[in-house]
Image (cartoon, grey):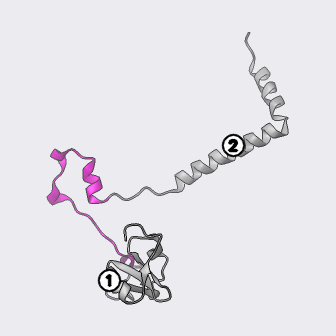
Amino acid sequence: MRQSIQDIWSKFKSVLVDETVFMAVVVLLVAVISFGLGRFSVASPVLSGSAMTASLPASEVKTSEIKVETTTRASLNSEPASQSAGAETGEYVGSKNGTKFHLLTCPGAGQIKEENKVYFSSKQEAYSQGYTEAANCKGI
């Protein structure tokens, strides 16, 4: 038994007349569209030198030609590192107004205002000044 497009469309419309089914379809569509937009809006991660070479065959990798460019927060602000307030001098950072310290790569370190940052070269230095490890910073 063949059905025409009009028959299929009329059955589809009769199913959507039920409010529960209609709302379920709307919620599903909104969820799928939101997920797709969220994935689309995320920028692709920048590959480091080792990650770039991992995907290449060993015969094509020339270590003398690999250049990895690093940037600091000071250079992103178009301000020379020597002029930026509190230039990065250690592995760990804390806030003048807080009691926790973070690795420079932790998300919590990025939330500290540049003028409030206190840098430590070691955990012991941070401990000696009364700071404790941040719980949300993995790898400390």
How many numbered marks appear?
A: 2
The answer to whether residue 87 shows anywhere in this view is: no
Label 1 to label 2, Cα distance in Å?
52 Å
Three-letter residue code for mark 1: Gln
The percent position of residue 55, horizontal first and vertical second, equals 28, 47
The percent position of residue 40, horizontal first and vertical second, equals 53, 52
Above/below status of 104 relative to 61: below
From the image, tell me which residue sits under label 2: 28
Quick check: 140 left or right of 38?
left
Above/below status of 110 relative to 50: below
Query: Label 2 crowding class (10 Å Cα cut-off): few <14, some 14-19, many 20+?
Result: few
Identify the image quadrant of the C terminus. bottom left
**Disc 2 secondary structure class:** helix
From the image, tell me which residue sits under label 1: 124
Q: Nearer the viewer, mark 1 or mark 2?
A: 1
The percent position of residue 5, horizontal first and vertical second, equals 74, 21
Identify the image quadrant of the N terminus. top right
Magenta span covers which residues? 48-76
**In which quarter of the view is residue 127 placed?**
bottom left
**Residue 87 in magenta stretch:** no
| Residue drawn where x is 69% and y is 43% of the image | 28
